[in-house]
Amino acid sequence: MSKMDINTWQEYPFSQLFIIEKGTRLTKAKMVDGSINYIGATAFNNGVTAKIGNTEHLHPAGTLTVCYNGSIGQTFYQEEPYWATDDVNVLYPKFKITPNIAKFLCSVIYKIGLKYAYIDKWTAEKMRNTMIKLPSNVDNEPDWEYMENYITNIKSKVNNSISLINNSFNSRELRTKIDTNNWKRFHLYDNSLFIIDSGTKLDRVKMTNNNPTVNFVGRANINNGVTDYIDEIEGLKPYEAGCLTISLGGEYLGSCFIQQKPFYTSQNVNVLIPKHEMNDYCKRFISTMVFREGRLRYKAFIDELNRHMKTDFSILLPVSNDNRPDWNFMEDYMRRIENRTKLYVSQMIYTMNTNV
């Protein structure tokens, strides 16, 4: 798929395109169960964090929600009336919006919001003065027709790719469920696994990037948890590549990644330092199990991992005959996943290797 040429796009202030309103705080004590979407500062489930029955401050369908705190920049199109928390800005379009135009805008707005992540809050006031770059027509107005057609073509190609992939890889082997009945629970600090380090607990706003050489890992679930690239701090040695990081709380609780370069960490990110030689396939297997366990048994902002990591947090792992972690199983399994994924990607590239 060819790279999009944005050289002819033009910038427009958000205030020209949208009426922007801040959401309304609703405490848990006043929250009533119901069927109305409650939009919070999350990157998942179209922003929906709960279903409520409160009806006092609803926003209409056909509007956009943007997190200005927490998962900053996460943007969703809402197709039903909803309540937005005060961590969310609501965008009322001053133009005729469609689901396809909304999807195009959501991607562009999210990219803009990334520059505010972990540094500043993208408040309604700041957003009104922010510029958004969009395709334009001969009248120097946003080219809504282009956006509509672009997303329509993307959908068509994605649907074709999914169909081809399903037909190509619908094998019995890949659908077989793993039997975990004989697996065993291990604490991350067990002798065969890791040293759990509390991390450097740095504040990004106090760092510099004049000559960046070190990754900065925060509580994120994309880009391997890396949120910035910064200067090395004199007297503070970065962690070595090959260690794992795990987010202890917040929206991305349990997110666990292998770090490929030297790094520092933000608050509430622990570092897992292998006690023995461990290849990346086994680390990937473990990181997946850590994430699964974290999301299954713990709750962001309520019961987070901080007090559990060095005490009762454990993960299921396959075991060999001596009841130790079965490293061969983990490696073989992840190799199969890797090979299957490469085939998937090859198929996607093949089917989408035409101009949109």
Image (cartoon, grey):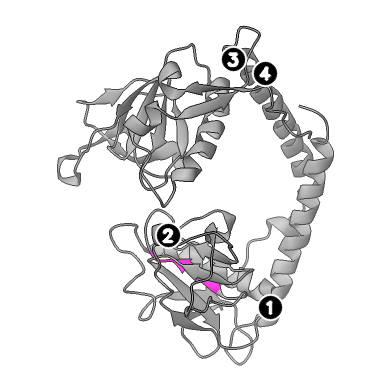
- In the image, the segment drawn in magenta is 244-248
Q: Quadrant of the C terminus?
A: top right
Residue at 49% x, 11% y: name it.
96
Q: Give the mark, 1 or 3, whose residue is nearer the N terminus.
A: 3
Q: Amino acid at mark 2?
A: Arg
Badge nearest the viewer, 2 or 4: 2
Query: Can residue 179 be seen in the rendering of this structure?
Result: no
What residue sits right under mark 4 in the picture? 149
Q: Give the mark, 4 or 3, whose residue is nearer the N terminus.
A: 3
Q: Give the mark, 2 or 3, whose residue is nearer the N terminus.
A: 3
Badge nearest the viewer, 2 or 3: 2
Q: Are marks 1 and 2 in contact (CB under 8 Å)?
A: no
Q: Is 246 colored magenta in this rendering? A: yes
Mark 2: give few (<14), some (14-19) or many (20+) Cα within 10 Å. some
Q: CA distance from mark 1 to mark 3?
A: 49 Å
Q: CA distance from mark 4 to mark 3?
A: 9 Å
Q: Is residue 338 left or right of residue 318?
A: right
> Which mark is drawn over residue 204?
2
Query: Can residue 72 be seen in the rendering of this structure?
Result: yes
Q: Give the mark, 1 or 4, whose residue is nearer the N terminus.
A: 4
> Which mark is drawn over residue 190?
none
Badge nearest the viewer, 1 or 3: 3
Q: Amino acid at mark 1?
A: Asn
What residue sits right under mark 1 in the picture? 279
Q: Is 163 colored magenta in this rendering? A: no
What residue sits right under mark 3 in the picture? 144
